[in-house]
Each structure stands twice: as C-alpha cells, then as structure tokens.
Image: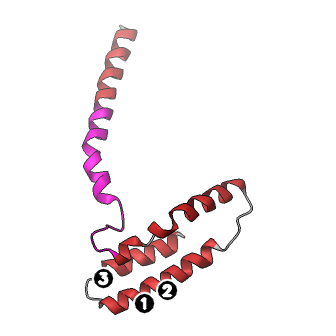
Amino acid sequence: MKRLSLRAIAVNRRQTLAASTLQQYGSRFRGSLWEILNLKPQSPEGQQLFRHYLTIEKHLLLFLDNETVPPTNHFSEQALRWSVVFRKELYILEFGKRYTLGNG
C-alpha cells in the first residue's frame, strides 16, 4: 500500500503530464489498489487496517482526479506545528520549575 501511495504521489507531482496520461495512471493505480484490497490479512491488526482501507477506499486516490486536493497532509501539519512547539516549550518550562522547586 505504501509503495502504491508513493508512486501515485510521484506521478501527481509531475506537472507536464497530459490529462489523458493522468487518467491512465489513475486507472492503473485503482487496479493495483483493488488487488491489494482483495488480499485477506490473517492477523487481527491486519484485518482492522483492511476494514479501515475499505471504508476510505474511494478517497485514497482522490488527489489524482481533483487538483485542489493535496496528495499529503504536509500543509496541515505545518499549520499545526507552531502550537506543538509552544506546548512542548511550555511543558519544559513547567517541568523545569517543578524540578527546581522539588530539589531546592
């Protein structure tokens, strides 16, 4: 699944491809996706992941059809990054105060 996703993202990043070529790649990737989804996992964790993929299957390659949908959530993660850094710094400051008070 990871290899399929990475290949689809790489194709999507190529700006010089014609629409018909993108359609052909999309059809090929959807066929590969169905081959993967036809595999039956044996472990409980694999079965749970399999069920999750079945519920989101129609959205996995949506970025190939719709140019406004980004292939990754990189921009969302970058938008949240400042709040995570702030929270970690606040925790370090608080932990440092407690550590100083506890040992002083």
Camera-near label (3 vs 2) is: 2
Quick check: 39 left or right of 77?
Answer: right
Q: Do residues under tags 1 and 2 come within 8 Å of each other at their CB atoms? A: yes
Task: Name the residue that disc number 1 marks.
Answer: 24
Main SS type for the magenta part?
Answer: helix
Give the residue displayed 36% in from the left and 15% down from the top. 98
Image: 53 above or below 10: above
State how far apart marks 3 and 2 are (Cα). 16 Å
Closer to the camera in the image, 90 or 9 = 9
Q: Which numbered dot is residue 28?
A: 2
Marking on residue 80: none
Residue 72 magenta = yes
Count of picture labels? 3
* Crowd class of label 2 (few under 14; some 14 to 19; many from 20; radius 10 Å): few
> What is the quadrant of the N terminus in the image?
bottom right
What type is the residue that disc 1 sits on? Answer: Gln
* Residue 75 is one of the magenta-drawn residues: yes
| Mark 1 nearby-residue class (10 Å; few <14, some 14–19, many ≥20) | few
Residue 11: where, in percent of width, then height? 37, 81
The image quadrant that residue 7 belongs to is: bottom left
Which quadrant would residue 35 be assigned to in this image? bottom right
What span is in magenta? 66-89
Query: Pointer 3: what residue?
Result: 14
